[in-house]
């Protein structure tokens, strides 16, 4: 169909599957109504709204190609404006794409017989119970394209939501029309129309979904926690402490300063290795360096500890500092074949201490990591909960029916 605008002499050509009841020039927004089969000029829109899509632009939705046949710009609350793009496929089916503050909703007209003129707080549609978000009067302040209906200058809109779904009911003197839709991401809109730029999204959209499903997150974490408990029990139900070394190592070894232990094999999940070092130091110090060698990978883990013990009598009081025995750990020792290399040293002036006694025990697996994982999951759930609450508060902040109002 070719239509020439008498105002700007622009010819608009587009294949449509209906006889237009109204036409608004995409170039100058001159409005024409059909009278006895002819389009008569009736006025002009002067909207300065930035149209993201244009009449005749094509996009793919649900595997079907649609063409933008008409665009309406509506305004409510004095200054808030949004765009509604009417899409039609070659079979004459319609979809409706709404864009408000950079958020997009794809809708279709549905049969909804319940009267909502008295604005009930909830309605049921499909499998959902939707909550009243707001009702308000809207006026059309801009338009472009072909329309198979008379453009009503003012309508009452009643919106019910169950994010990401919305049921929008338009009431005019001729009755009510219902549209049911779902939030659609900017990425999907870009892909559908093959464009790279869309308006920046501000705030939280009316039915914009929260990135995390809190209920599913909790269920997933609980299931993971149960699996961790059973896995830990299964892997370690027969585990006991294993003493891998109990030796007195003399200072000043003849061939080497190092003492190498026989090999030992550890089996099971990772656990800390506890080391106790004892030396009869007296107003002196000693040191033990321990190297744990994995004989398969040649990985070496080092740890060392000072043993210091001092005592005396000062200002009429006895005092002591330090100890002749010290404990330390090598954490997270996994199964495998190992040996230890011990390097003892002592103060040069210490001639009374001849040896250092070292005990090493591979402990039962610690539950520390298990509890830390539980703590992390709990804190993560709490964080998501409060972020979700803030997100929902922002969604409902412009509604008169917010469940988060404190009044």
Image: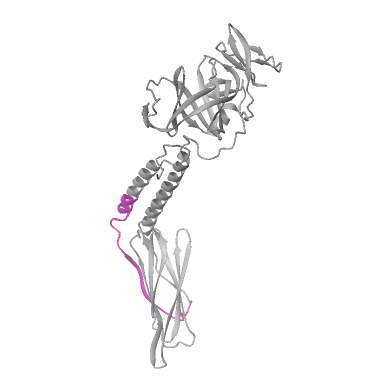
Could you tell me residue 45's position as x and y percent? 63, 23
In this rendered view, identify the residue nearer to me: 279 or 125: 125
Q: Is residue 397 visible?
A: yes
Q: Is residue 237 magenta?
A: yes
Q: Which residues are magenta?
A: 228-256
The residue lying at 31 percent from left, 56 percent from top is: 236
- Quadrant (top left/top right/bottom left/bottom right) for the N terminus: top right
Q: Is residue 261 above or below residue 350?
A: above
The residue lying at 44 percent from left, 31 percent from top is: 165
Residue found at the very far right of the displayed protein: 9
Residue 139 image-quadrant placement? top right
Left or right: residue 84 compared with residue 295: right
Could you tell me residue 327's position as x and y percent? 39, 72
Q: Is residue 309 magenta?
A: no
Total numbered labels: 0
Q: Is residue 210 visible?
A: no
Residue found at the very far left of the displayed protein: 238
In this rendered view, identify the residue nearer to me: 91 or 12: 12
The residue lying at 49 percent from left, 85 percent from top is: 348
Could you tell me residue 205's position as x and y percent? 50, 36
The colour mode here is one colour
Q: Is residue 224 above or below residue 310?
A: above
- Quadrant (top left/top right/bottom left/bottom right) for the C terminus: top left
In this rendered view, identify the residue nearer to me: 185 or 313: 185
């Amino acid at each position: 169909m070719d239509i020439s605008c008498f105002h700007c002499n622009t010819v608009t050509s587009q294949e449509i599957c209906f006889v237009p009841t109204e036409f608004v020039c995409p170039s100058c927004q001159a409005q024409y109504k059909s009278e006895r089969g002819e389009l008569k000029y009736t006025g002009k829109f002067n909207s300065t709204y930035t149209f993201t899509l244009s009449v005749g632009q094509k996009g793919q939705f649900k595997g079907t190609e649609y063409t933008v046949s008409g665009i309406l710009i509506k305004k409510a609350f004095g200054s808030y404006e949004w765009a509604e793009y009417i899409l039609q496929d070659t079979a004459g089916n319609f979809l409706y794409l709404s864009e408000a503050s950079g958020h997009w909703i794809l809708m279709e007209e549905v049969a909804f017989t319940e009267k909502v003129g008295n604005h009930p707080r909830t309605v049921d549609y499909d499998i959902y119970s939707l909550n009243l978000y707001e009702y308000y009067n809207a006026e059309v302040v801009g338009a472009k394209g072909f329309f198979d209906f008379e453009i009503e200058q003012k309508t009452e809109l009643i919106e019910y939501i169950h994010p990401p779904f919305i049921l929008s009911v338009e009431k005019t003197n001729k009755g009510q029309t219902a549209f049911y839709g779902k939030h659609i991401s900017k990425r999907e809109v870009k892909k559908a129309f093959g464009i790279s730029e869309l308006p920046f999204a501000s705030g939280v959209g009316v039915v914009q979904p929260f990135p995390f499903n809190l209920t599913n997150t909790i269920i997933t974490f609980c299931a993971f926690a149960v699996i961790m408990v059973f896995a830990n029990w299964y892997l370690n139900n027969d585990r006991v402490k294993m003493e891998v070394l109990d030796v007195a190592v003399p200072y000043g070894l003849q061939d080497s300063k190092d003492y190498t232990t026989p090999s030992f094999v550890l089996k099971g999940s990772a656990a800390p290795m506890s080391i106790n070092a004892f030396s009869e130091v007296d107003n002196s110090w000693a040191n033990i360096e321990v190297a744990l060698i994995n004989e398969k990978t040649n990985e070496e883990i080092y740890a060392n500890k000072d043993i210091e013990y001092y005592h005396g009598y000062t200002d009429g009081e006895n005092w002591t500092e330090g100890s002749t025995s010290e404990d330390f750990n090598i954490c997270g020792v996994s199964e495998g074949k190992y040996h230890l290399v011990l390097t003892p040293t002592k103060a040069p002036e210490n001639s009374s201490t001849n040896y250092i006694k070292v005990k090493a025990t591979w402990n039962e697996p610690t539950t520390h990591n298990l509890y830390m994982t539980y703590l992390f999951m709990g804190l993560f759930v709490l964080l998501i909960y409060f972020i979700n609450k803030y997100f929902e508060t922002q969604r409902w902040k412009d509604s008169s029916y917010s469940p988060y109002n404190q009044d």
